[in-house]
Image: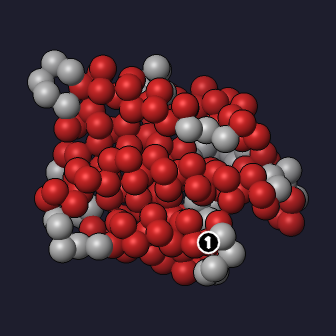
Amino acid sequence: MILPKDRDPRFITVRRGGTLTDSDHYLLALWAANCAEHVLHFFEAERPSDFRPRQAIEQARAWAGGEITMTEARAAGGHAMGAARNLKGAARWAAYAAGQAAVTAHVAAHELGAAAYAIKAARAAAPEGRAELAGRLECRWQRDRLPVSISDLVLEDERLRNAICWSVFDC
């Protein structure tokens, strides 16, 4: 479980009593999709004919663009995570990253799941003795792509949830 027990109101939309604007929610989903897509090749190398994780990333972007409903994006996320079931290592974590990116449409705090699983994928794919470095590089890559308007929010979320996210954000 990488979601906190108590939900942070900054990740709850204004419509539901939180402070998250729709525009920032969309940016979180797009950033999560970018994080997942960056490691998707680990999954596709192992399962080239399984398009569920790629479709989940596409659905996250489609939701952020107003092209599909939250329910459609959430379903695609579940399918991507299902693609991970019989896998190990980088391919598994990459599929989970894609799933988390899509379900960000439903619960904005899943944005960090996409990032954390992407870092786990990078670590798992690294040559022996290079996993920590690969994870730090992936973390920095992600941070370099954070939109300015959500940067403080995401970095604070990383700090607060690092311990329940396998300490992957120590970069």
Residue flagged by tag 1: what amino acid is it? Trp
Residue 31: percent from left, percent from top: 57, 49
Q: Residue placed at 16% from the left, 65% from the top?
A: 47
Q: Is residue 158 left or right of residue 20?
A: left
Above/below status of 50 relative to 165: below
Above/below status of 162 relative to 80: above
Q: Coloring scheme of the render?
A: secondary structure
Toward which corner of the image does residue 160 lie, by quadrant? top right
Above/below status of 111 relative to 83: above
Q: Report if residue 111 is visible in the image.
A: no
Q: Residue placed at 80% from the left, 52% from the top?
A: 20
Q: Nearer the viewer, residue 44 or 4?
A: 44
Q: Report if residue 73 is visible in the image.
A: yes
Q: Residue placed at 72% from the left, 31% from the top?
A: 152
Residue 132: percent from left, percent from top: 29, 21
Above/below status of 70 relative to 102: below
Q: Nearer the viewer, residue 100 or 147?
A: 147
Residue 162: percent from left, percent from top: 52, 29
Mark 1 packing: few (<14 Cα in 10 Å), some, or many (20+)?
Answer: many
The local secondary structure at tag 1 comes to: helix
Toward which corner of the image does residue 99 lie, by quadrant? bottom left
The residue that mark 1 highlights is 63
Total labels: the figure holds 1
Residue 73: percent from left, percent from top: 54, 74
Q: Residue placed at 14% from the left, 59% from the top?
A: 46
Q: Is residue 61 left or right of residue 14?
A: left
